[in-house]
Amino acid sequence: MERAAAYQRGCGVDVEVLDAAEVRRRVPWIAGERLAGGTFGARDGFIDPGRLCGFFSSAAAHDGVSFRYGQEVVAAEEGAGGFVLGTADGSTFSAPFVVNAAGAWSARLGALLGVDVPVEPVRRHLFLTGPVRDLPPEVPMTIDADTGVLVRREGERVLVAWSNADEPPGFDTTCDPEFVLRFAEALEARFPSVAAAGIDQRRSWAGLYEVTPDHHAILGPVPERPGLLLATGFSGHGVMHAPAAGRCIAEMILRGRSEGVDVDALSLARFARGELIHETMVL
Ligand SMILES: Cc1cc2nc3c(=O)[nH]c(=O)nc-3n(C[C@H](O)[C@H](O)[C@H](O)COP(=O)(O)OP(=O)(O)OC[C@H]3O[C@@H](n4cnc5c(N)ncnc54)[C@H](O)[C@@H]3O)c2cc1C
């Protein structure tokens, strides 16, 4: 974490490295003996993804982008001038560039285009507690790095999450009420006042992560398929990465390469080359 913090600071991110005493001072509801320290970014951990999406789409519309909602691409052909995509309602669209940004469904869209996109849908649960009385109004997003249990304030409740490494791939988004039992002990040990508020199953839900073999995005052109690009496989970090990913892809289309950030390590080719990125903290 110290290495990551040093790198982040080098990129201009405001992140602090805290010793154990400072972690306990700032997050006094943390329990348990074993605590080495932590890192803290005051601007991290909270975002409204719907509003972020709305912000980008209205800015793009203002600049002349048009959106077609509810149009599932069900067919794709490659021609001399680019691609022709067919949608479920029988419309066709042609374009010199196509970006497969279909999230958890990217492998299906890739198959239509004849490209193997190594992205699998994996269910991810989010739980909300009942109203919490014993915690301050500000509960930063706090991750127990040992177990992967994370908590943060969400209005009068606390949001709780944990990802199990053995969740099988699939499109099931049923919220399994038993799932919480798998990390209840870890939650109680580290965040007892959160556990005491109990889980409100009616407000809890599950969605899909779009997971690659190394839990990192695939960003960039498909080799030997001019005009076809991938912006997918964010593996549960896609909201955070969205602004940078969008810029990289726009630069690749307009200028032939990502100028602002070197994203070669995120190429599709890394899987064939066996150059997977080693991720130390999968959330
Ligand atoms: C429970 C949960 C918690 C998360 N928490 C965080 C977090 O704290 N921070 C964070 O950064 N990220 C988080 N994520 C991950 C984040 O939501 C995703 O990484 C992000 O939404 C991916 O964005 P995307 O645009 O690549 O894909 P999506 O948002 O999935 O968009 C893909 C779009 O493609 C459309 N599509 C698919 N197939 C077709 C087709 N054939 N034709 C036309 N359209 C198609 C889909 O309908 C969809 O609208 C979380 C995800 C879940 C499920």
Image (spheres, rainbow, N blue to C red):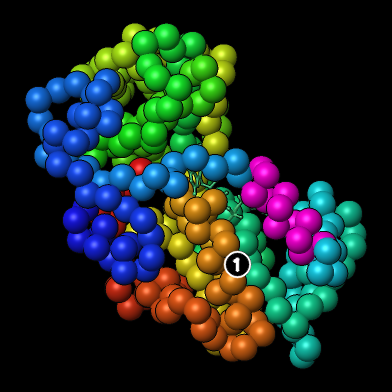
Q: Is residue 11 visible?
A: yes
Q: Is residue 265 left or right of residue 252?
A: left
Residue 220 placement (x, y as % from top left): 53, 76
- Total labels: the figure holds 1
Name the image quarter holding residue 6: bottom left
Q: Is residue 231 visible?
A: no
Nearest the camera: 6 or 232?
6
* Residue pictured at 53% horizontal, 66% vertical: 244
Residue 58 falls within the magenta-colored stretch: yes
Most common secondary structure along the magenta stretch: helix
Residue at 51% from the left image edge and 26% from the top image edge: 154
Local crowd size for mark 1, using a 10 Å CA cut-off: few (<14), some (14–19), many (≥20): some
Q: Report the quarter where the C terminus lies.
A: top left
Q: Is residue 243 above or below residue 211?
A: below
Seen in the picture, residue 56 relative to 247 is either above or below; the reply is: above
Q: Residue at x 48, y 11 (%)?
A: 130
- Answer left or right for 234 relative to 161: right
Along the horizontal axis of the image, is 279 left or right of 52? left
> Where residue 281 sits in the image (x, y, percent)?
28, 49
Amino acid identity at mark 1: Gly
Q: Which quadrant of the view contains residue 153?
A: top left
Tag 1 residue: 246
- Residue in front for this viewpoint, 123 or 158: 158
Where does residue 117 sit, x and y in percent of width and height? 51, 65
**Magenta-colored span:** 50-61
Of 229 and 2, which appears nearest the observer? 2
* Residue at (42, 71) in percent of width and height: 266
* Of the pair 107 and 206, the residue shown nearer to us: 206
Give yes or no for residue 143 being in the magenta stretch: no
Element under disc 1 = helix
Q: Is residue 112 left or right of residue 201?
A: right
Respond yes or no on whether mark 1 lies under 8 Å from ligand 1: no
